[in-house]
Amino acid sequence: MRIIDRQAMRAILLTPQDRVLLMRVDYGSGDWWITPGGGTEPGETPEATLRRELHEELGFALPAPGPLVWRRRVLMRFGPQCWRQAEDYFLVETAQFQPEIQNAPEAGRIREFRWWSLPEIRHSSERLAPERLARIVMDYRENGPPDGPLGLEIVEE
């Protein structure tokens, strides 16, 4: 099996009412609710990646990236390929808006968008990533921006 190393940037978009935007994506082996974002292109900075991905997937113009709050390392299988992906999660405070896919290469896999409350995230039986999403947001609300990412989650999907 071919393993592809990949760096990705993701945004936890959080409203003043503590709602988080997730998108339901079909990965072939089932759907996952994930935060918007995606892979870094050669020579691209983390901020540039986040801006590009949020524009492509949501039509959202990122005013400024928020603090880096979480790191996740995940091994994902896609048929004959396997991605070993390092993900950095940035918290972005925003008003609620209606996402509109622009020119996202993965648009065919995006099934829907939804703003979730923290209790909905905590008690959901859906597959969500990162698994600690509600805790990450609650830590941010209780303690403010961290000095660095709160932790590292290593997952094999």
Image (tube, rainbow, N blue to C red):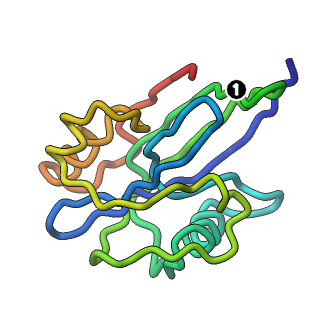
Q: Would you identify the image quadrant in which residue 19 lies?
A: bottom left
From the image, which quarter does the N terminus lie in?
Answer: top right
Q: Secondary structure at mark 1?
A: strand
Amino acid beneath label 1: Arg
Image point 17% across, 70% down: which residue?
A: 16
Q: Is residue 23 left or right of residue 92?
A: right
Q: Of residues 103 and 20, which is closer to you in this image?
A: 103
Q: Is residue 52 above or below residue 115?
A: below
From the image, which quarter does the C terminus lie in?
Answer: top right
Image point 25% across, 36% down: which residue?
A: 124
Residue 89, how many percent across, how many down? 46, 49
Q: Is residue 109 above or below residue 86?
A: below
Q: Is residue 119 left or right of residue 34?
A: left
Badge 1 is on which residue?
77
Q: Is residue 71 left or right of residue 133?
A: right
Q: Would you identify the image quadrant in which residue 3 lies?
A: top right
Image point 35% across, 60% down: which residue?
A: 114
Residue 145, how many percent across, how many down? 28, 55
Image point 52% across, 72% down: which residue?
A: 58
Q: Would you identify the image quadrant in which residue 122 lies?
A: top left
Q: Residue reaching furthest right?
A: 2
Within 10 angstroms of label 1, few (less than 14), some, or many (20 or more) residues? some
Q: Is residue 49 above or below residue 127?
A: below
Residue 4, how many percent across, how many down? 81, 33
Q: Is residue 154 above or below residue 43?
A: above
Count the marks.
1
Residue 100, how many percent across, how many down? 51, 76
